[in-house]
Amino acid sequence: MSGKSTGDRRSVLLQGARIVDPSQGLDEAADLLLRDGSVAAIGSNLKAEGAETVDVTGKVLVPGLIDGRAHLGEPGYEHRETLDSGLQAAAAGGFTAVVATADTAPVVDQRALVEMITRQADRLGWARLYPTATVTKGMAGSELSEVGELTAAGAVALSDGETPIANAALLRRALMYASHFGVPILHRAADLQLESDGVMHEGHWSTRLGLPGSTSVSERSIVARDLFLAEEAGGRLHVAPVTVGGALDQIRAAKEAGLQVSCDTTLHHLLLTDEAVHSSTFSTATRVSPPLRSEQDVEALKKGLQDGTIDMIVTDHRPFHADEKEDVQFSVAPPGVVGLETLVSLSLDRLVKAGIIDLARWVELLSCAPARIFGLPGGSLEVGRPGDVTVLDLDAEVTVDPSTFRSQGRSTPFAGWTATGAAVGTFVGGRRVDLPQRT
């Protein structure tokens, strides 16, 4: 069976699993029937004549996981990642959908590019792809993109990626304009003047290691500015990502005041601190943007997961060619690591098994909330919704081995880490995704 999720729409009956779907308040043993690409029924001892029956006893079925931010390279950076390799990595990691960034070459600021990327992903069929388009033309920060055309073509959000919008008047106008089309503005909260030439978090470890630091005030100051703009403009602001405890406090207060604000963080910002630069002996796999933060910031982020302030955990999957990331000095290595094939296992182990959050909250962070924030059809196993399902084995033992990745990227700070729990299958549009043998 190929990975295509379109075409043949056979019925599939998944029997004997535990179904966890916080969108319906479900956490129970049941069967799940997929028919004609959608969820047809949930219940005990379901029967479906002619359906393919799959025994998933002992497994957990959840609404298909959605990665809220991944850099997939194509077009323009195919030496780093192609849509084929990136979406195979997504499926292998348990994701049925990916929200792709706009920082390709050329950047996604034209309707034709949105349509081209979407068509190519549909042909591949490994996972759904939802494009992000740029806020400004060419990500130059001076002129708004054609928001109406881009959203009509399928863009689910607007973002200039790693390039913060310094012009407050322009961002205010973008928030107002995007609100008419129902899409959020994803904004990297950073003051580039404050960040200067910093390559890691400014603090004890940057001083000890003699590396230029990036102050956390960079994030906090722009989050404060952006929240004021969102309050006045009335648009939907999404902080992508939040990594500093003080910035998270600002977002929490804004939510309590009723602002339309959401935020995400990454797994590496939840599991690692700036000390990792030292303990890894300057491994370029710890060179990320925003930088790994302090222990106090990490604890604040975990609290944000628990109290609902953080809406999503994203991979921020950012592959680079080995020549770019390996055998180069820490300070000149491009920031970013891969995450599509590590997030599920490590978060199940370090967050759920560790008791920081429960499984229902985990599903909310990785499926329900991304669907809600981006207005996607997934995020629920309610009857009539798309037949996108992730199958979990909470007892599977996993060791992170970059040599087995389907992604072309290999840089991960988690190489050699062990975990309990894994995604063992996905269904997209009612069809099981069977990845090709690795060569």
Image: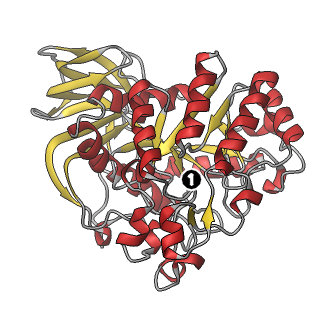
Q: Quadrant of residue 356?
A: top left
Is residue 15 rendered to the left or right of residue 323? left
Residue at the spot 46% in from the left edge and 53% down from the top edge:
294
Classify residue 383 by image quadrant: top left
Question: Could you tell whether 399 is left or right of 231 in the image?
Answer: left
Determine the residue positioned at 57% across, 69% down: 78
Above or below for 247 versus 346: above
Residue nearer the viewer, 274 or 269: 274
Q: Quadrant of the C terminus?
A: bottom left
| 382 w.r.t. 57: above or below | above
Colour pattern: secondary structure
The residue shown at (17%, 26%) is: 18
Left or right for 263, reference 139: left
Nearest the viewer among 436 and 366 is: 366
Q: Which residue is mark 1?
A: 120
At 37% across and 33% down in the image, what residue appears?
388
- Give the left or right position of residue 424, taking residue 269 as reference: left
- Residue 287 location, x and y as percent? 50, 67
* Residue 408 makes an appearance in the image: no
| Quarter of the view holding residue 417 | bottom left
- In the rendered structure, which amino acid carries the disc numbered 1? Gln
The secondary element bearing badge 1 is classed as helix
Residue 427 visible, this orientation: yes
Residue 149 in picture, x, y percent from top left: 79, 37
Task: Check disc 1: other Cα within 10 Å, few if <14, some if 14-19, many if 20+.
Answer: few
Instruction: Indicate the position of residue 394 as horizontal and vertical percent values.
Output: 17, 40
Q: Position of residue 145 (x, y in %)?
A: 83, 44
